[in-house]
Image (cartoon, rainbow, N blue to C red):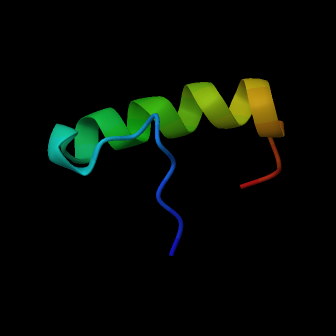
């Protein structure tokens, strides 16, 4: 269970998906998830 500091749990699922898409594409790559 990973909890990135840039993804606050109180933000909700919408923000989580947003950060996941943006952050993963930039920091980890499009196929790293």
Asked if residue 11 is positioned above or below residue 26 in the image, the reply reads: below
Give above or below for 33 relative to 22.
below
Where in the figure is residue 28, as x and y percent of width and height? Answer: 80, 40
Work out whether residue 18 or residue 3 is closer to the camera in this orientation and state it. Answer: 3
**Camera-side residue: 1 or 25?**
1
In this image, 32 relative to 5: left or right?
right
The quadrant in which the C terminus is found is: bottom right
Furthest-front residue in this view = 5
- The number of discs equals 0
Position of 21 with respect to 15 (left or right) is right
Q: Position of residue 31 (x, y in %)?
A: 82, 48
Q: Is residue 10 above or below residue 2?
A: above
**Residue at (62, 30) in percent of width and height:** 23
Image point (68%, 37%), residue name: 24
- Residue at x 16% of width, y 45% of height: 10
Q: Residue, x 46% and y 34% (percent of image)? A: 6
Residue 13: where, in percent of width, then height? 25, 47
């Amino acid at each position: 269970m990973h909890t990135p500091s840039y993804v606050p749990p109180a933000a909700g699922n919408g923000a989580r998906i947003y950060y996941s898409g943006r952050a993963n594409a930039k920091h980890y790559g499009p196929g790293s998830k």
